[in-house]
Amino acid sequence: MLFCDLCDRGFHIYCVGLDTVPSGRWHCVECAICKSCGARSPGGAGGAAGAASTSEPAEWHHQTRRGLGGHKVYSHSLCTPCARSVPCIPTHSSLRLVLLSYRSSALTLSPSARVL
């Protein structure tokens, strides 16, 4: 038996077209919705056509956040096209490099600027 991670409905794996129980999260057709575009298919709002342009198979991308105690907690799901368009959040070190790069380019553009 396979159970939805959101609503706890139970399914036989062969009734939902699977050969084996998937690893990780699994959502039934009632609960599988992209938070960004509202698609009910992992291929996106346009169906599998959006994912067919690449060799990557259409699948749900489950996003997590850090909960109490630093544990990963499910946040939301995205279809393949929306997951590809989500920008990466910069880490503190990469953000600092961007800031330093900006400051150095500002200094080269304005030679009369004072360095503190």
Image (tube, rainbow, N blue to C red):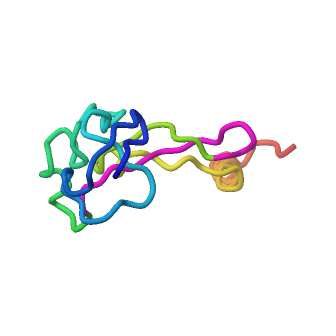
Name the spot of residue 15 as percent of width and height, x first.
19, 51
Using the rendered view, name the quadrant where residue 29 is placed: top left
At x 37%, y 48%, the residue is 26
At x 48%, y 45%, the residue is 63
At x 64%, y 48%, the residue is 102
Image height check: is 1 above or below 8?
below
The question of residue 43 being in magenta is answered with: no
| Front one among 72 and 96 | 72
| Front one among 15 and 93 | 15
Quick one: quadrant of the C terminus?
top right
Image height check: is 45 above or below 85?
above
Residues rendered magenta in the picture? 57-71
Name the spot of residue 82 as percent of width and height, x first.
32, 44
Residue 79 left/right relative to 77: left
At x 63%, y 49%, the residue is 109
The question of residue 70 being in magenta is answered with: yes
Name the spot of residue 2 as percent of width and height, x first.
35, 50
Residue 98 left/right relative to 50: right
Instruction: State the residue lying farthest toward the bottom.
Output: 55
| Front one among 8 and 58 | 8
Image height check: is 6 above or below 95?
above
Using the rendered view, name the quadrant where residue 3 is placed: top left
